[in-house]
């Protein structure tokens, strides 16, 4: 087996790194991949992170190379310590994402490569003298954040390196728009379409009283950044007054949204719920959704 080298990312790594990232994306969400330009942009800044992005003081990307092939890569962030930075992020270091070939693949030394690259990440945190060390799996693609259950090799690496899951778990659900319920008119109620906080909002009214609403974001696939994510949207907010119509209202709102999504050329809809919210999950499962994956958020370095 040829020697393994851990070094800073070079621009001529871009195609191999993009292939490695896309392999991880494909295990989480169907039909989504990112372009080389998307990956390179993410190494410089995260356009969608308008809150935490400005808090970052430094970014470093490291790769593990074997036989002139990138077998693992990690993107590190160092956050500033100023008062404008959120308390949990002040003087923090974070592995924004870590990708590597799984064990028993065509690269028999992949686990050793991952361990060596992780050692380099921890050494970089030590040089930065950060207060706390976090880890995530937020590659630059829709739906992929936290640590998806579809990456057991990354989970095993984080755990043997001293990272512990200290946050919550989210359930990610997916439905074909064709499987969503058809809207059923209800006497005395109307539906209005407006701009919402997280996308296009559909609000159900009884007279002038708002009974509930759903917000749909159809801009997940920015054409200049994503090569393949067309036909995908997500639910930004869903609220239905249980005292009035409960589940029936929620399904009616989903039906209204489905009609709009068909006009937009969207054929798949995503939803996110806390793993402990069984009622919300059951409602979505009953409306045509299926569980896509679960992702564990907030990993912190707490070696024994």
Image (spheres, grey):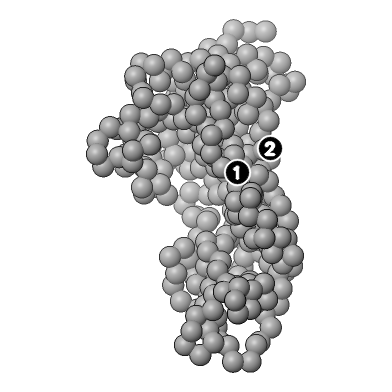
Q: In this view, does 54 lie to the left or right of 68?
A: left
Q: Give the CA distance from mark 2 to mark 1.
A: 14 Å
Task: Give the structural element (helix, strand or loop) at label 2.
Answer: loop
Residue 88, compared with residue 218, is above or below; it is above
Question: What residue is shown with label 2?
Answer: 150
- Viewport quadrant of the C terminus: top right
Residue at x 51% of width, y 37% of height:
298
Question: What residue is shown with label 1?
Answer: 169
At which x and y percent is residue 110? 65, 18
Compare residues 288 and 60 and report the one nearer the observer.
288
Mark 2 and mark 1 residues within 8 Å of each other at the beta carbon: no
Mark 1 nearby-residue class (10 Å; few <14, some 14–19, many ≥20): some
Compare residues 116 and 107 and report the one nearer the observer.
116
Residue at x 53% of width, y 34% of height:
166
Q: How many marks?
A: 2
Compare residues 271 and 239 and report the one nearer the observer.
239
Instruction: First in sequence, mark 2 or 1: give its number.
Output: 2
Is residue 290 in view? yes
């Amino acid at each position: 087996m040829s020697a393994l080298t851990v070094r800073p990312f070079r621009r001529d790594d871009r195609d191999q790194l993009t292939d490695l990232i896309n392999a991880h994306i494909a295990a989480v969400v169907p039909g989504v991949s990112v372009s080389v330009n998307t990956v390179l942009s993410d190494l410089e800044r995260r356009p969608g992170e308008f809150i935490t992005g400005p808090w970052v003081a430094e970014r470093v990307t490291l790769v593990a190379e074997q036989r002139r092939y990138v077998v693992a890569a990690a993107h590190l962030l160092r956050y500033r310590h100023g008062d404008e930075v959120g308390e949990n992020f002040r003087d923090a270091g974070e592995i924004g994402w870590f990708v590597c070939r799984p064990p028993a693949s065509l690269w028999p030394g992949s686990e050793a490569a991952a361990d060596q690259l992780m050692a380099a990440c921890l050494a970089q945190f030590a040089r930065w003298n950060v207060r706390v060390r976090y880890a995530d799996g937020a590659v630059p693609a829709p739906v992929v954040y936290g640590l998806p259950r579809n990456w057991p090799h990354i989970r095993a690496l984080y755990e043997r390196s001293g990272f512990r899951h200290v946050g919550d778990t989210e359930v990610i659900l997916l439905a074909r728009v064709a499987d969503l319920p058809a809207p059923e008119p209800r006497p005395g109620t109307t539906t209005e379409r407006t701009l919402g906080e997280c996308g296009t909002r559909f609000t159900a009214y009884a007279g002038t009283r708002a009974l509930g609403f759903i917000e749909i974001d159809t801009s997940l696939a920015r054409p200049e950044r994503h090569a393949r994510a067309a036909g995908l949207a997500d639910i930004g907010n869903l609220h239905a007054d249980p005292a009035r119509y409960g589940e029936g209202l929620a399904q009616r709102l989903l039906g209204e949204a489905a009609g709009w999504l068909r006009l937009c050329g969207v054929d798949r809809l995503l939803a996110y719920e806390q793993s402990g919210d069984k009622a919300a999950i059951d409602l979505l499962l009953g409306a045509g959704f299926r569980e896509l994956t679960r992702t564990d958020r907030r990993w912190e370095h707490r070696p024994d």
